[in-house]
Image (cartoon, helix red, strand yellow):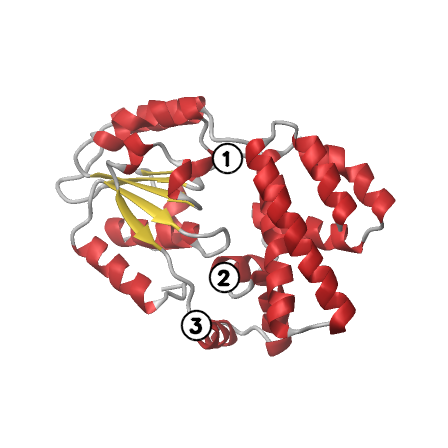
């Protein structure tokens, strides 16, 4: 398998594959590798490699465009896909993967409910999310749940060493990712298609800019709600890792503590305040 599993997660996946339900919700923080796990499960269910899933006639992978939501039209496309006949003669013959299902609009989630509740025979739906609370209770009650756990750091190091990465490359990725294997893979592979890679690039840029430059880009960041959340997550990972490793001396440590406090305020205000631009501006001023 081209993924490193925590032993608890590995056991849970094994139990699911032994007796797969019609719908599965993978839960874990951004960067833990939920999408990779979803594809690993789909490949096992269909007896194909994870790499071949993208072109499989009975696989549909749905995700939001960068900084956007999964729309009701995308869900309608899923429903149309489920209406097509398959050549399956028994067992699982079709899989739908919805990456970051928490980005679905309320209308999209409501439209998906019937498909999750009663998919056609031989069909499995795999949804991934950072938080169960972002998914409607009516959907949560109709799916099996699998919480992903982060592997031990030594296991992560050994895994990426065996893939051919140098110790310096791995250490650099660890400093940003905090050991989240999905984010580690994104960083080491420089996966430009991943929103977390874009957020990492933006986070580094923001932390290096002066106050005036940060304020200039605040307006653009505020226009992309999901990117803003991913940006806060990445900066938080960087701060937590720097503090755990004691990097940079007392001045740097004080700055990281200040940044973590600013992130906490920004996340709380983002949830409670419709004026995202004001939240972003205040965050930039507090760095």
- Mark 3 → mark 2, Cα distance in angstroms: 10 Å
Residue 245: which quarter of the image? bottom right
Label annotation for residue 161: none
**Dot 2 corresponds to which residue?**
180
Q: Nearer the viewer, mark 1 or mark 3?
A: 3
Specify the quadrant that holds the N terminus.
Answer: bottom left
Q: CA distance from mark 1 to mark 2?
A: 22 Å
Report the front residue among 64 and 105. 105
Looking at the image, is mark 1 or mark 2 earlier in the sequence? Answer: 1
The secondary structure type at the circle numbered 1 is loop
Name the side, left or right, on which 189 lies relative to 98: right
Q: SS class of the residue under badge 2?
A: loop
Q: On the rendered structure, is 115 left or right of 66?
A: left
Circle 3 is placed at which residue position? 152
Q: Position of residue 126 (x, y in %)?
A: 32, 43
- Compare marks 1 and 3 and give the one earlier in the sequence: 1
Judge whether residue 119 can be spotted in this image.
no
Quarter of the view holding residue 279: top right
> In the image, is 215 to the left or to the right of 74?
right
- Which residue is at 17% across, 56% downward? 18
């Amino acid at each position: 398998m081209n993924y490193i599993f925590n032993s608890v997660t590995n056991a849970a996946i094994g139990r699911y594959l032994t007796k797969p339900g019609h719908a599965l919700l993978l839960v874990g923080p951004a960067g833990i590798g939920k999408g990779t796990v979803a594809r690993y499960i789909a490949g096992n269910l269909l007896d194909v490699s994870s790499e071949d899933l993208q072109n499989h006639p009975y696989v549909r992978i749905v995700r939001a465009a960068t900084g956007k939501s999964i729309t009701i039209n995308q869900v309608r496309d899923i429903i149309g896909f489920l209406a097509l006949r398959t050549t399956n003669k028994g067992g699982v013959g079709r899989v739908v993967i919805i990456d970051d299902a928490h980005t679905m609009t309320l209308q999209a989630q409501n439209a998906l409910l019937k498909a999750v509740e009663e998919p056609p025979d031989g069909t499995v739906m795999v949804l991934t999310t950072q938080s169960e609370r972002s998914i409607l209770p009516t959907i949560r009650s109709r799916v099996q749940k699998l919480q992903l756990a982060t592997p031990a750091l030594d296991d992560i190091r050994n895994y990426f060493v065996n893939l051919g990465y140098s110790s310096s490359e791995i250490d650099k990725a660890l400093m940003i990712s905090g050991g989240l294997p999905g984010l580690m893979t994104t960083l080491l592979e420089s996966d430009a298609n991943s929103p977390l890679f874009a957020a990492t690039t933006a986070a580094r840029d923001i932390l290096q800019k002066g106050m005036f430059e940060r304020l200039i880009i605040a307006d653009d960041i505020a226009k992309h709600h999901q990117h803003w959340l991913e940006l806060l997550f990445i900066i938080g990972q960087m701060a937590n890792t720097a503090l755990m490793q004691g990097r940079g001396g007392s001045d740097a440590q004080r700055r990281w503590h200040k940044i973590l406090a600013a992130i906490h305020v920004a996340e709380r205000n983002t949830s409670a305040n419709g004026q995202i631009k004001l939240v972003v501006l205040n965050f930039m001023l507090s760095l």
